[in-house]
Amino acid sequence: MAPASRSGSGHALPHVSILVPARDEEHNIVRCLESLLRQEYPSFEVICLDDGSKDRTPQLLAELQLRYPKLRVLEGADLPEGWVGKCFACHRLSEAADGRWLLFTDADTVHDPDMLAAHLRTALAREAGLLTGFPRVISRHALGWLTLPMLFFVIALHLPLRRVEGARDPRFTAAHGAFMLYRRDVYDRIGGHAAFRGALVEDMEMARAVKAAGEALVLCDITERTGCEMYRHPAQIWDGFAKNLFPGLGRSTPLLAGLLLFYTLFYIAPLPAAAVLLPLGERPAALAFLAVFLLGALQKAAVDRHFRVPGPWFLLVPASFTVLVLLAVRSWFLAFRGRDYVWKGRRYTP
C-alpha cells in the first residue's frame, strides 16, 4: 500500500468536498464531523446528509450546524425504487458538492487533523483517480476484534497488493467504502453513484470502474490518520457481513465454496488436529499441524499490529476464520433462499 504523504508535494491543494451519509448514527456523528471540520487544510467543505434517521442524529446535526458554520446538512428523501440507501445518499451529496475532489467517508469514522492534507498530497503525487484505504479498527466487543481485522487480512491473503496500483486490470482491485477520495472528473466519468444505484458492495464496483476507465487506483495506508468503528453492537456484524460477503464475491457459489474449504483446511482445522493427534502419540503429524497454525497466527499478527488490534487476538485465528465462514454461509444462504438482506431498517433483495 502507498504510504500517506508527510510533506508538501509541490502541488497546489484543490478545494475538497467531504461528504458524509448518516443514518441512525447518534453515537458516532458528533465525533466524526468534529474531526472532519477541524482539518488543517486550506479549502474544504463538509456536507452531511441525514438519511431518514430515527434516532437523535437530526438533533445532533442541528446543534453542530450552530457551532460550525462550515457544516452543511441535507435532509434525506424517499428512497427511489432500485436504489440502495447509501448509494442514493452519496448521489445526492455529490450533486450538492462543488469540490474538485470528493471524499466520501462514513459517519462511524474519526480522522486526525492532517488527514485530508496528507492523503490529498498522496493522490496528487500519484495522479490518482481514486485513493482509498482500510482504516484502523475500533471496536467495543470481542466479536469485532475477531472479525473486523479479517477484512484486510483476507484481501492481503488473496490479492497481490502491488498489483492493485500497478495493474490496470480491474480484477486487481481493493477498496473500502469508509474512505473513497475521487477526483471529481473521474467520479463523473464513471457515472457516479447513480451508475451503481443497486450495488450492495458499491465501493468495489466503483473502484473497478475507475481502473476500467484507465485511471489510477491508489490503495493507501490510512490507519495512522483514520479509524472506523464499523459495528458498535455485535448483532450489527451479522447483518453487515451478510449484506456484503456473498455479493462481494460476485455471487459465485463455486468461488465461495473453494475459499471456505481453503480457510477450513489451513486456518481452522490445524490447531484442533494437533490437539487430537498429540495425545495419540502422533507427534510428527501434530507438530506439522501446529506449524501450520503458527504460520497463520503470525500472518494474522502482522495484520493486527498494523491495524492496532490490542492483545493477542492473532492467537485466535481459528476462531476468527470460523466466524468468517459462518458469516459467509449465512450471506450465501440468504441469497440462495431469496431472503432479503436487512440493514438499518431497510430490506434489499439479493
Image (cartoon, rainbow, N blue to C red):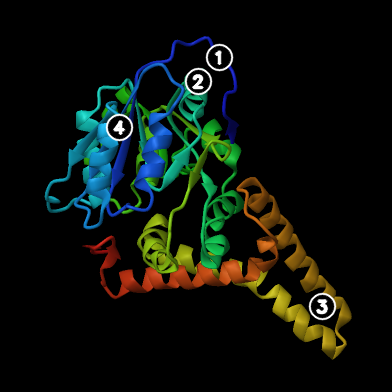
Real-space CA distance between mark 4 and mark 1, rounded to the nearest whole angstrom:
31 Å
**First along the sequence among labels 1 and 3:** 1
Q: Is residue 261 above or below residue 221?
A: below
Please report whichever mark, 2 or 1, sits nearer to the chain's N-terminal start.
1
Name the amino acid, label 4.
Answer: Arg
Look at mark 3 in the image and give the residue it sits on: 286
Q: Which residue is mark 4?
A: 67
Near-viewer residue (68 or 220)? 68
The residue sitting at the bottom extreme is 280
Q: Quadrant of the C terminus?
A: bottom left
Q: CA distance from mark 2 to mark 1?
A: 7 Å
Which numbered mark, 4 or 3, is in the foreground of this view?
4
Q: In whole angstroms, how far apart are the C-alphas of marks 4 and 2?
A: 29 Å
Front of the two marks 3 and 2: 2
Describe the element under mark 1 as helix, strand or loop. loop
> Which comes sooner in the sequence, label 4 or label 1?
1
* Residue 189, label in figure: none
The amino acid on which the numbered mark 3 sits, given as a three-letter code, is Ala
- Residue at x 59% of width, y 53% of height: 153
The residue nearer to you, when weighing 53 against 147, is: 53
Mark 2 burial class by Cα count in 10 Å: few <14, some 14-19, many 20+: many
Q: Is residue 315 above or below residue 220?
A: below
Whether tag 2 and tag 1 are in contact, CB under 8 A, the answer is yes
Q: Which mark is residue 121?
A: 2
Locate residue 289, reporting x and y percent.
77, 73
